[in-house]
Amino acid sequence: MYKNILVPIALDHDRNTTEALEIANAISEEGAKVTALHVMEEVPAYVAQYLPEGQLEDNVNELERRLQDELKDTPNVAIAVISGHAGHAIVDYAKDNNVDCIVVASHRPGLTDFFLGSTAARVVRHAPCAVHVSR
């Protein structure tokens, strides 16, 4: 059983997050910490300079609100929104927060996934902890 579980959730994809959270609850020990994490892609500096002041913070607040709305029926789940490249940011978050298991949803790979690799594949290859992949 795991004590600190990370569940990456992509709000920009039309996936059901219920299954990943159910898996996290099933493999967690009593009193475990479960964190739902959304990674906001970084805005390049050459674009960010043209954004209104506070826009990036507003984006983070909006994503946190959307994540709270999506998880309103799921008790005891912490919410985190960070920015970066999804695969790298998830692995870095897991390292920095002593996560002992990541429950990541995956999709059936297409041809481009074999060349570029999916986020789930990158997490599996580089995670510092156990990874449970659900399809």
Image (cartoon, rainbow, N blue to C red):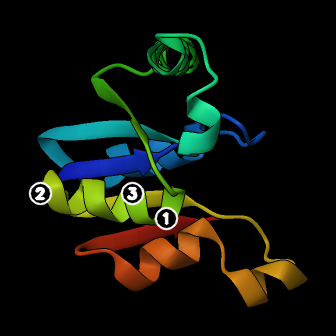
Where residue 14 appears, as percent x and y from the top left, is 78, 39
Return the disc, 3 or 2, that comes first in the chain's sequence: 3
Residue at 50% over, 22% down: 56
**Which residue is situated farthest in the bottom direction here?**
115
Give the residue number, with chain letter if any, for mark 2. Answer: 98
Task: Give the residue type at disc 1.
Answer: Gly
Q: Amino acid at mark 2?
A: Asn
Q: Which residue is mark 3?
A: 90
Q: Is residue 15 above or below residue 86?
A: above
The C terminus lies in quadrant: bottom right
Q: Secondary structure beneath disc 2?
A: loop
Mark 3 → mark 2, Cα distance in angstroms: 12 Å
Please state the horizontal and vertical placement of residue 101, each as a whole percent of the image: 27, 62
114 sits to left or right of 38: right
Name the foreground residue: 55 vs 85. 55
Indicate which disc residue 100 carries: none
